[in-house]
Image: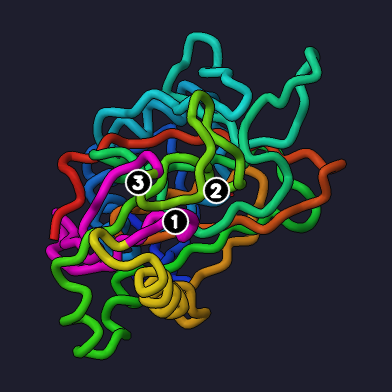
């Protein structure tokens, strides 16, 4: 089993294009040396899985803060905002609270492929998702490596894509729900969001990766809509091909950390009668995505 950083850390690659498991750690007890090793492993594998954690909200926030300043959680579909007193925590859940309202976002349906909050000018660099309650089956989360997908494209396609920008739509979330306070539209040319380069360079590793956001309401700036759709479909087919994907079957207590700058993720649906409760934090990006 590979040992990193003076044997501080066991890092077990998933064997897929992204992802490694880091067993045997208690994330409540991470010192600076260990954190340096974790950070290096994260830059290498893009997705890290820390099984068997027992994290209170405060522990999740404290570990997340080691990666940088945290974003406040976005508004849920029902207009609710934060966990009372802890604005950094976002809940992903299908569970209803005592008032009959969902305690979190995304329900029990599929969440389509996306990069977190790329409709913003400066999206979060990292997301951390902690599994507090999981269903017996379903609800797996899939991660696609955008560096591998970029490298797999033919040179002629890479040359065609350099310099293009894509609209990252802010109308709908990955569950297909309208974001709070947004007017519905299905015309990507005037939907709210942000234009980002289609190919971005990772600010820390220097490696290029596709930066796609989400497919719905995506549009390549300045391109006739039909042509934009055809080109995006071609790129998305490569980006989400199984050879670039790791599928995570959750265990209770898993903390999964991913890099939003070079991965996308999606989630399988699960039985709406089952309970799934996940707590998420997000680390602010240091700069807008750049070519
Ligand atoms: C998300 O898309 O951020 C949530 C993923 C999940 O529920 O597993």
Q: Position of residue 213 (x, y in %)?
A: 38, 55
Say which of 89 and 4 sits in front.
Answer: 89
Mark-to-mark CA distance, 1 and 2: 8 Å
Residue 118 got which mark? 3
- Quadrant of the drawing holding the N terminus: bottom left
Q: Which residue is mark 2?
A: 174
At a point 53% along the width and 26% down the height, the residue shown is 180
Q: Please say which color scheme the image uses.
A: rainbow
Label 1 with label 2: CB-CB less than 8 Å? yes
Total marks placed: 3
Q: Residues within 10 Å of mark 3 (few under 14, many from 20)?
A: many
Q: Secondary structure at mark 3?
A: loop
Helix, strand or loop at mark 1: loop
Would you say residue 40 sits in the magenta stretch? no
User: In the image, which residues are magenta?
Assistant: 191-219
Q: Residue at x 41, y 27 (%)?
A: 61
Q: Which residue is disc 1 drawn over?
A: 214
Label 2 Cα crowd, 10 Å radius (few <14 / some 14-19 / many 20+): many
Marks 1 and 3 sit apart, C-alpha to C-alpha, by: 8 Å
Residue 287 is drawn in which quadrant? top left
Residue, x 61% and y 40% (percent of image)?
177
Q: Mark 3 vs ligand 1: CB under 8 Å?
A: no
Query: Residue drawn at (17%, 68%), measured in percent from left and top?
Result: 207
Relative placement, left or right, of 253 versus 98 is: left
Q: Which mark is residue 265?
A: none
Is there a contact, CB below 8 Å, between mark 1 and mark 3?
A: yes
Identify the element where label 2 is drawn.
Answer: loop
């Amino acid at each position: 089993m590979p040992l990193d950083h003076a044997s501080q850390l066991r890092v077990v690659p998933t064997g897929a294009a992204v992802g490694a498991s880091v067993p045997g750690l208690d994330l409540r007890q991470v010192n600076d040396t260990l954190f340096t090793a974790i950070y290096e492993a994260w830059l290498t594998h893009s997705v890290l899985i820390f099984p068997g954690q027992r994290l209170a909200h405060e522990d999740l926030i404290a570990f997340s803060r080691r990666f940088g300043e945290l974003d406040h959680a976005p508004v849920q579909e029902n207009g609710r905002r934060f966990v009372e007193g802890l604005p950094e925590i976002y809940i992903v859940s299908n569970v209803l609270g005592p008032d009959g309202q969902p305690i979190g976002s995304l329900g029990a349906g599929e969440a389509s492929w996306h990069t977190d909050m790329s409709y913003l000018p400066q999206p979060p660099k990292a997301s951390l998702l902690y599994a507090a309650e999981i269903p017996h089956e379903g609800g797996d989360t899939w991660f696609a490596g955008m560096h591998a997908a970029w490298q797999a494209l033919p040179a002629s396609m890479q040359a065609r894509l350099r310099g293009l920008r894509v609209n990252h739509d802010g109308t709908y979330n990955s569950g297909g729900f309208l974001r709070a306070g947004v007017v519905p539209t299905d015309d990507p040319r005037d939907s709210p969001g942000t234009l980002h380069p289609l190919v971005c360079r990772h600010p820390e590793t220097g490696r290029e990766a596709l930066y796609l956001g989400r497919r719905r309401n995506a549009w390549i700036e300045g391109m006739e809509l039909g042509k934009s759709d055809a080109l995006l479909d071609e790129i998305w087919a490569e980006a989400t091909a199984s050879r670039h994907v790791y599928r995570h079957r959750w265990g209770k207590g898993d903390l999964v950390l991913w890099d939003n700058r070079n991965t996308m993720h999606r989630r399988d649906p699960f039985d709406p009668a089952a309970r799934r409760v996940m707590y998420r934090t997000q680390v602010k990006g240091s700069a807008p995505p750049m070519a």
